[in-house]
């Protein structure tokens, strides 16, 4: 089963994340969506990460703006691969979030996507590529997707 967990730090991030729904559907990727702040709900975040550690979730997509600690905090808590998506939530246009996510200390990697909507969509496509390593159906879907110019239709 191809399942990811999408974690956002704030309800205000929902609109950006929803842009990826049609890609999740196209690639037939199941997902959970959680709103958990690394700063305001640290204990709840830890409990959630612990609860998925040995389950069907194979990839975590963590989206965050401003200080953007969510992806790094999650990566420090789990062995599940984390894809970080910086969001435009400040006067710096998301560059602050990009630097926070991409500049992780050695030993705590976070795969980092583009800022905003393109990054969220790319996190789904990247997840599909990871799943395609061991899933021939996913490999076919990716091939079809690429033949269409990396578009859904």
Image (cartoon, helix red, strand yellow):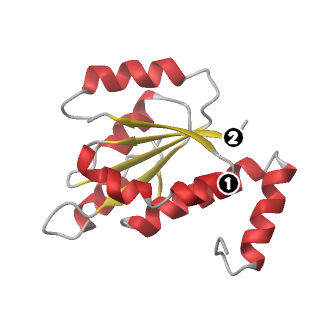
On the image, the x and y values in percent for residue 95 come to 26, 68
Label at residue 128: 1
Task: Tell me the crowding category of disc 1: few under 14, some 14 to 19, or many 20 or more residues within 10 angstroms, Cα based.
Answer: many
Label at residue 48: none
In depth, the one of 104 and 71 nearer the eye is 71
Residue 80 visible from this viewpoint: yes
Q: Residue at x 32, y 62 (%)?
A: 98
Q: Quadrant of residue 57?
A: top right
Distance of label 2 from label 1 (alpha carbons)? 8 Å
On the image, the x and y values in percent for residue 64 come to 31, 50
Q: Residue furthest left?
A: 91
Q: Are marks 2 and 1 in contact (CB under 8 Å)?
A: yes
Is 70 rendered above or below residue 64? above
In depth, the one of 137 and 113 nearer the eye is 137
Residue 103 visible from this viewpoint: no
On the image, the x and y values in percent for residue 24 come to 59, 53
Q: Which residue is mark 2?
A: 2
Element under label 2? loop
Q: Residue at x 59, y 59 (%)?
A: 23
């Amino acid at each position: 089963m191809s399942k990811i967990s999408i974690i956002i730090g704030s309800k205000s991030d929902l609109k950006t994340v929803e842009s990826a729904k049609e890609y999740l559907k196209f690639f037939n990727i199941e997902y959970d969506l959680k709103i958990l702040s690394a700063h305001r709900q640290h204990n709840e975040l830890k409990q959630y990460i612990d609860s998925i550690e040995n389950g069907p979730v194979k990839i975590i997509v963590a989206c965050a703006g401003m200080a953007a600690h969510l992806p790094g905090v999650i990566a420090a808590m789990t062995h599940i691969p984390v894809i970080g998506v910086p969001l435009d939530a400040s006067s710096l246009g998301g560059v602050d979030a990009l630097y926070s996510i991409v500049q992780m200390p050695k030993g705590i990697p976070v795969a980092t996507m583009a800022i905003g909507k393109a990054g969220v969509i790319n996190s789904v496509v990247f997840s599909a590529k990871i799943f395609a390593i061991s899933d021939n159906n996913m490999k076919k879907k990716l091939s079809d997707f690429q033949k269409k110019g990396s578009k859904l239709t």
